[in-house]
């Protein structure tokens, strides 16, 4: 073992002396910068193909889908990860000039002499150290150019994409300032000046470079920002930076306003949520163990439960007939039979690591997942859920991979309640958004209120009329409905003051 360590150390110093280490650094730099280009291209392609979100289609008010929101966040996290790698690892290794004024001394072995605020750089043709120094400046310049090219490409689309900005700024949890942090390096005038000085050096050192063009030279030649710098086009930089600064400020103000509105909604909801005139008409049913056992046998994993509680004041402020919606996970013995892929193997759903933290609650009969004002998304027993007057249970039709949907539902547990009622936020969840997130393959009906897209329990219930879900159990005003459940559900949803909806006849 000692011999191996000495051999590895000797090989390391030999590679430094021979120059092979520089080639390794070059390959690493190329890989990092090429990855940044791919990430930027993916983000631009994503934005270019979202014409509604970019405002290209007039009066287009549909919400972004759950999958699109997840993809947008993934792309921006990838961009931030690239920026961190490039500016915290790659740039410190290769930023040799550091924005200082310089003088090149001709045909002398490479050296770097620092004066007061300036440096003297000696270069010699066909000398390895001179070539390595020039290449480092190339890497430094191209790292910053990739960032600026991305910045300029994204500034105008992001100025139009208010919805995307709102999601990026307000709904990324601890990454809430990721959007601003990703581009703050572009807003720093020191970085612009350093890039200009790097390009000036590369122009003056052309005579000391060989004829073979590297990846970095090729990128510099086609860089939009490098061309603007060569033309001394400061106006483009100023316009773009002012544009992005303006939309960032606007987005932060909008985010602050939404937080205020959400806080007011929370105080109001918690206050009126305590007001209840009586018990639910189905509570006695919940106290009958035999009746509850029969009911649970009728339920299947991923059934959706709707309830109405006209005796609670909160029910009066929810549009439509039903006031709350939840998801039935299924009995443990049913979940045990489900299979899910994990690390290339097919295992029982209950053996999945994401399930393990919830097994104790499942064993206690807490098989209803619902979003409550307090504590947010949680697990409750069906008996606790039954303090209600009305209940309808609908089963999804043709759901592929139900185990994956179970995992999605459990993944939302612990999220706070969404007092802004915005379907385009994932960091907080209201009851009907729970279904919206778990069944993300459907195009759900929504309403637009105060600049945000909302989904109510009745929006979800209407999908049963579209044949996406089949009503299998129903109670109205404390009495069981045994005939024409679909017709009765449609009649209740069409009551005066309800949510209007034209069924599409399909589940898309």
Image: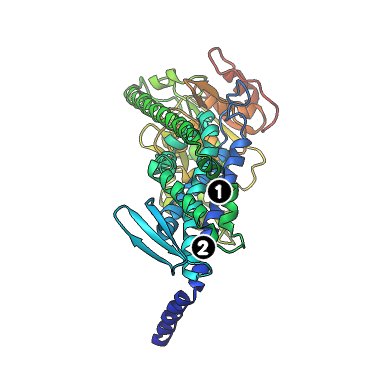
Looking at the image, is mark 2 or mark 1 nearer the viewer?
A: 2
Q: Vertical placement of 38 versus 186: above or below?
A: below
Q: Residue furthest bottom?
A: 3
- Using the rendered image of the protein, determine whether residue 299 is visible from the camera's viewpoint: no
Where, quadrant-wise, is the C terminus in this rendering? top right
Number of numbered discs visible in the structure rendering: 2
For mark 1, what is the residue?
Answer: 39
Give residue 44's position: percent from left, percent from top.
Answer: 58, 40
Name the residue nearer the viewer: 352 or 19.
19
Name the residue nearer the viewer: 325 or 381.
325
Where, quadrant-wise, is the N terminus in this rendering? bottom left
Give residue 325's position: percent from left, percent from top.
Answer: 50, 31
Give residue 40's position: percent from left, percent from top.
Answer: 56, 45
Q: Residue furthest left?
A: 116
Mark linked to residue 28? 2
Name the residue nearer the viewer: 89 or 254.
89
Q: How is the image coloured?
A: rainbow
* Mark 2 vs mark 1, CA separation in Å: 17 Å
Q: Vertical placement of 183 versus 499: above or below?
A: below
| Circles 2 and 1 in contact, beta carbons < 8 Å | no
Disc 1 crowd, CA 10 A, few/some/many (<14, 14-19, 20+): many
Is 134 positioned to the left or the right of 51 in the image?
left
Secondary structure of residue under mark 2: helix
Secondary structure of residue under mark 1: helix
The quarter of the displayed image where residue 294 is located: top right
Give residue 483's position: percent from left, percent from top.
Answer: 64, 25
Is 98 positioned to the left or the right of 166 in the image?
left
Q: Residue furthest right?
A: 505
């Amino acid at each position: 073992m000692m011999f191996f360590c000495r051999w590895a150390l000797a090989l390391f110093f030999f590679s430094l002396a021979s120059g092979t280490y520089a080639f390794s650094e070059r390959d690493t730099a190329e890989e990092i910068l090429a990855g940044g280009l791919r990430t930027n291209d993916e983000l631009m392609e994503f934005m270019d193909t979202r014409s509604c979100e970019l405002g290209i289609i007039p009066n287009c008010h549909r919400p972004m889908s759950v999958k699109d929101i997840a993809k947008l966040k993934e792309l921006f996290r990838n961009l931030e990860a690239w920026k961190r790698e490039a500016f915290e690892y790659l740039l410190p290794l290769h930023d040799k000039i550091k924005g200082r004024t310089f003088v090149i001394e001709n045909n002398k072995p490479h050296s770097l002499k620092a004066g007061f605020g300036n440096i003297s750089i000696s270069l010699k043709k066909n000398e390895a150290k001179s070539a390595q120094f020039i290449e480092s400046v190339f890497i430094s310049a191209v790292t910053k150019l990739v960032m600026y090219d991305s910045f300029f490409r994204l500034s105008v689309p992001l100025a139009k994409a208010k919805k995307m900005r709102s999601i990026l700024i307000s709904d990324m949890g601890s990454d809430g300032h990721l959007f601003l942090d990703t581009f703050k390096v572009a807003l720093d005038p020191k970085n612009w000046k350093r890039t200009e000085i790097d390009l000036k050096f590369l122009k003056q050192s052309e005579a000391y470079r060989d004829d073979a063009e590297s990846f970095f030279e090729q990128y510099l030649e086609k860089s939009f920002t490098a061309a603007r710098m060569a033309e001394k086009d400061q106006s483009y930089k100023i316009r773009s930076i002012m544009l992005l600064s303006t939309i960032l400020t606007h987005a932060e103000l909008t985010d602050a306003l939404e937080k205020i509105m959400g806080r007011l909604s929370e105080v109001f909801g918690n206050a009126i949520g305590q007001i209840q005139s009586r018990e639910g008409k189905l509570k006695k049913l919940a106290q009958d163990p035999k009746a509850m056992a029969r009911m649970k046998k009728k339920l299947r994993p991923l059934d959706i439960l709707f309830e109405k509680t006209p005796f609670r004041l909160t029910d009066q402020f929810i549009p439509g007939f039903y006031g709350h919606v939840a998801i039935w996970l299924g009995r443990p013995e049913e979940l045990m039979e489900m299979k899910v892929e994990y690390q290339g193997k097919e295992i029982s759903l209950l053996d999945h690591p994401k399930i393990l933290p919830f097994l104790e609650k499942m064993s206690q009969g807490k098989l209803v997942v619902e979003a409550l004002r307090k504590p947010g998304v949680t697990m409750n027993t069906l008996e606790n859920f039954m303090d209600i007057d009305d209940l309808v249970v609908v089963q999804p039709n043709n759901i592929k991979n139900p185990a994956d949907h179970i995992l999605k539902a459990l993944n939302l547990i612990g999220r706070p309640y969404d007092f802004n009622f915005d379907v385009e936020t994932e960091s907080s969840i209201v009851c009907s958004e729970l279904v919206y997130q778990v069944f993300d393959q459907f195009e759900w009906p929504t309403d637009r209120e105060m600049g945000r897209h909302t989904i109510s329990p009745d929006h979800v219930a209407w999908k049963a009329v579209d044949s996406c879900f089949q009503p299998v159990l129903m109670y109205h005003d404390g009495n069981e409905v045994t005939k024409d459940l679909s017709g009765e559900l449609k009649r209740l949803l069409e009551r005066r003051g309800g949510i209007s909806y034209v069924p599409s006849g399909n589940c898309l």
